[in-house]
Image: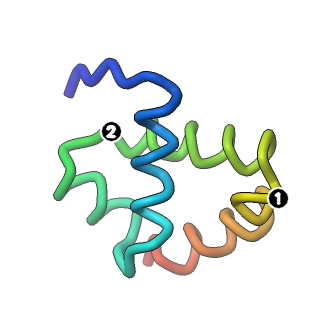
Amino acid sequence: MANRFSRDQWRTQVERYLASDMSVAEWCRVNRLSESSMFKWIGNFADREPELFGGSHNIEDRCHILWS
């Protein structure tokens, strides 16, 4: 899984994930992405663009709920 996505491409992936009803694990498996990279970018966008991504607390809660 050596994906070399740009920041914009990761942003699209995170937005698509957040719009889905999938867990991070399921999303990454279906889209052939690394879970660790996905969590890194989710946190990155939540911290840098809280107005668009609801802040890290919101995203971390959603990821925790969907992780199970």
Where residue 61 sits in the image (x, y, percent)? 68, 73
Instruction: Name the residue rendered at 40%, 60% in the picture.
Output: 16
Q: Quadrant of the C terminus?
A: bottom left
Q: Give the residue pinned by disc 2.
A: 34
Where residue 28 sits in the image (x, y, percent)? 29, 52
The picture quadrant where one finds residue 55 is bottom right
Where residue 64 sits in the image (x, y, percent)? 58, 71
Residue 11 versus residue 42: which sits nearer the camera? 11
Q: Give the residue pinned by disc 1.
A: 51
Q: Is residue 5 left or right of residue 36?
A: left
Residue count near mark 1 (Cα–Cα under 10 Å), binned few <14, some 14–19, many ≥20: few
Residue 22 versus residue 13: which sits nearer the camera? 13
**Between marks 2 and 1 in the image, the one whose residue lies nearer the viewer:** 1
The picture quadrant where one finds residue 54 is bottom right
For the rendered model, the colour scheme is rainbow
Type of amino acid at the residue the image marks with label 2: Ser
Q: Is residue 42 above or below residue 20?
A: above
Q: Is residue 63 left or right of residue 19?
A: right
Q: Is residue 60 left or right of residue 47?
A: left
Instruction: Name the residue rendered at 41%, 34% in the picture.
Output: 9
Where residue 20 sits in the image (x, y, percent)? 38, 74
Instruction: Name the residue rendered at 37%, 24% in the picture.
Output: 5
Type of amino acid at the residue the image marks with label 1: Glu
Q: Earlier in the sequence, mark 2 or mark 1?
A: 2
Instruction: Name the residue rendered at 45%, 37% in the picture.
Output: 10
Q: Is residue 43 above or below residue 4?
A: below
Q: Secondary structure at mark 2?
A: loop
Q: Quadrant of the N terminus?
A: top left
